[in-house]
Amino acid sequence: MRLSNLADYAVITMCQAALHCGNGRVSAAELATETGLPVPTVQKLVSKLTAAGLLRSVRGAHGGLQLGRPAAAITVADIVEAIEGRIALTACIDHSPCDFESGCNMKPHWPIINNALRGALAGITLAQLRGPVAPAPTPITEDHLA
């Protein structure tokens, strides 16, 4: 599975917006400059992220953007779903037509797989992404089992 560029850029934009948390508001143009993303792309993302409640837009002289809720309460799953829609690895979960549905043994298992993937993304908060990178866990190999 690979996220779209837009979902990737949304995570980057939200991380940058989180850096301004507590320091007032930030504009879409400032986020674009700080992230190196094109202004129209950031404006499109801001629109979707605001509609999802992840960003809040305040108008006026001291207006701008701020997080819609605390960084610890916003997950990567929230951001991805704001841009991509519900997390699903296969189209059959969304009741799309499938030529092999009648003989498919996998269809009942996809919701379990999708929930595991969503759970993994929901376990990573914006607050965690703002901090230092934690070392990746060491994968278990046959050498470790011997």
Image: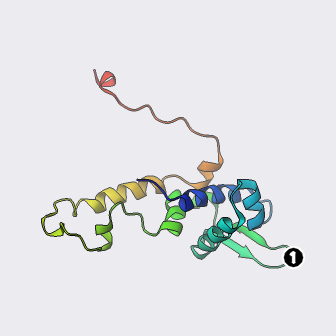
Q: Judge whether 86 appears above or below 20 on screen.
A: below
Image quadrant assignment for residue 142:
top left
Left or right, 5 with respect to 141, comes to right
Which amino acid is tagged 1? Ala
Q: Position of residue 112 (x, y in %)?
A: 29, 58
- Between 56 and 40, the one lying in front of the other is 40
Residue at the spot of label 1: 61
On screen, residue 81 above or below 139: below
For the point 78% across and 62% down, the residue is 30
Q: Is residue 133 above or below residue 82?
A: above
Q: Is residue 37 left or right of residue 53?
A: right
Q: Residue at x 18, y 68 (%)?
A: 101
Task: State the image coordinates of residue 136 (x, y, percent, origin top left).
Answer: 50, 36
Residue at the bottom extreme? Answer: 60
Q: Secondary structure at mark 1?
A: loop
- Within-10-Å neighbours for mark 1: few <14, some 14–19, many 20+: few
Residue 53 in sight here: yes
